[in-house]
Image (cartoon, grey):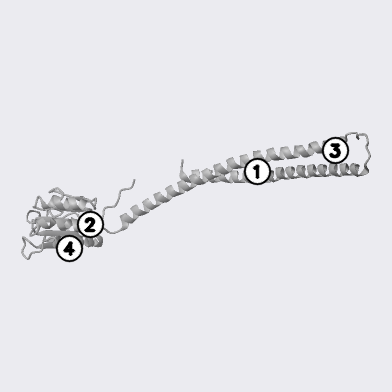
């Protein structure tokens, strides 16, 4: 059952129980009044009998017993009946009210549980939405892990991102900085330098028939390739712990497969930062 419908039913039941508890309270007042009236009548009878006996004592004469009065007998029975009925009524009403209040507390607990569950779902959805709209960043843990790439120091590096993709360019600069700190792509010659193509993908080839891009303009995720067969999986393993979209593209799918400089066969480590992947609708 849908949580909103369940909450509505629980609220309706809670309101019904509250209404009956209020009615029980009125009945309880009535039974209490019956007990009080019965006790008052009993006290009045006891007082009357005492006064009558006191008068006989002061008179000092012995008289034959008077005929029992039916009215007095009926009043005594009525007072006793009021007390008994009132006590029984109070007991029944108190028990009934207790059961209703116990059920109301159970309903309150269910409502609280549903509310907490809905709040937890809302927080999870908000966190997921936040992760979807937030830019990708290298965490301190990722930067620390990237220091292990120092064993590949001295290799050249190609770092690239898509044209006009500021979010991807931001992440690419962070990756470039961390890899440079690890000693990759810090030299001055082609074999050890960094080829910075951040915001420069795809390359545009101009010619007689106009301008032609060297690769697909729309790419998402992070692609890691290069000639160093040890450095590529090492970097992929580090980044895939934090970024789900990390992959090692095939030759045909490599972003720089059609590059006129044939970079895929000359660069030890190629890191291509595509656009942030958009989650599929469920």
Q: For residue 43, what is the image quadrant?
A: top right
Question: Whole-percent x and y of residue 249?
Answer: 16, 49
Q: Mark 4 points at which residue?
A: 177
- Cα distance, mark 4 to mark 2? 15 Å
Q: Is residue 220 left or right of residue 13?
A: left
Q: Which mark is residue 24?
A: 1
Q: Nearer the viewer, mark 1 or mark 3?
A: 3
Q: Is residue 52 left or right of residue 251?
A: right
Lower sequence index among marks 3 and 2: 3
Lower sequence index among marks 4 and 2: 2
Q: Is residue 190 left or right of residue 210?
A: left
Q: At numbered mark 4, what does the secondary structure look like: helix, strand or loop? A: helix
- Answer whether labels 4 and 3 touch (C-beta < 8 Å): no
Viewport quadrant of the C terminus: top left
Q: In this view, does 186 lie above or below 246?
A: below
Q: At numbered mark 1, what does the secondary structure look like: helix, strand or loop? A: helix
Residue at point 83% right, 35% down? 73
Lower sequence index among marks 2 and 1: 1
Residue 145 visible, this orientation? yes
Q: Mark 3 points at which residue?
A: 72
Q: For residue 59, what is the image quadrant?
A: top right
Lower sequence index among marks 1 and 3: 1
Question: Whole-percent x and y of residue 255?
Answer: 16, 54
- Cα distance, mark 4 to mark 3? 107 Å
Q: In this view, does 123 lie above or below 208?
A: above
Question: Whole-percent x and y of residue 205?
Answer: 13, 60
Q: Residue 141 carries which label?
A: 2
Q: Nearer the viewer, mark 1 or mark 4?
A: 1
Lower sequence index among marks 4 and 3: 3
Q: Which of 181 and 7 is in front in this view?
A: 181
């Amino acid at each position: 059952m849908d949580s909103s419908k369940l909450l509505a039913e629980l609220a309706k039941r809670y309101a019904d129980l509250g209404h009956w508890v209020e009615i029980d309270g009125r009945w309880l007042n009535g039974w209490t009044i019956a007990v009080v009236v019965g006790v008052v009548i009993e006290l009045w009878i006891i007082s009357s009998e005492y006064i009558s006996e006191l008068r006989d004592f002061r008179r000092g004469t012995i008289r034959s017993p008077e005929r029992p009065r039916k009215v007095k007998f009926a009043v005594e029975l009525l007072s006793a009946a009021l007390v008994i009925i009132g006590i029984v009524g109070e007991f029944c009403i108190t028990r009934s009210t207790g059961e209703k209040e116990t059920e109301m507390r159970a309903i309150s607990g269910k409502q609280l549980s549903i509310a907490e569950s809905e709040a937890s779902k809302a927080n999870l959805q908000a966190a997921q939405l936040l992760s979807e709209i937030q830019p990708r960043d290298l965490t301190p843990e990722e930067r620390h892990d990237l220091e292990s790439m120092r064993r590949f120091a001295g290799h050249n590096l190609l770092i690239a991102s898509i044209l006009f993709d500021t979010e991807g360019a931001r992440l690419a600069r962070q990756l470039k900085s961390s890899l440079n700190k690890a000693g990759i792509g810090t030299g001055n010659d082609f074999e050890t330098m960094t080829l910075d193509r951040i915001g420069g993908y795809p390359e545009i080839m101009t010619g007689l028939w106009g301008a032609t891009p060297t690769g697909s303009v729309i790419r998402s995720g992070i692609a890691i390739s290069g000639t160093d067969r040890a450095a590529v999986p090492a970097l992929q393993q580090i980044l895939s712990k934090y970024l789900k979209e990390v992959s090692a593209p095939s030759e045909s799918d490599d972003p720089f497969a059609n590059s006129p400089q044939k970079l895929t066969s000359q660069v030890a480590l190629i890191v291509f930062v595509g656009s942030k992947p958009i989650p599929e609708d469920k």
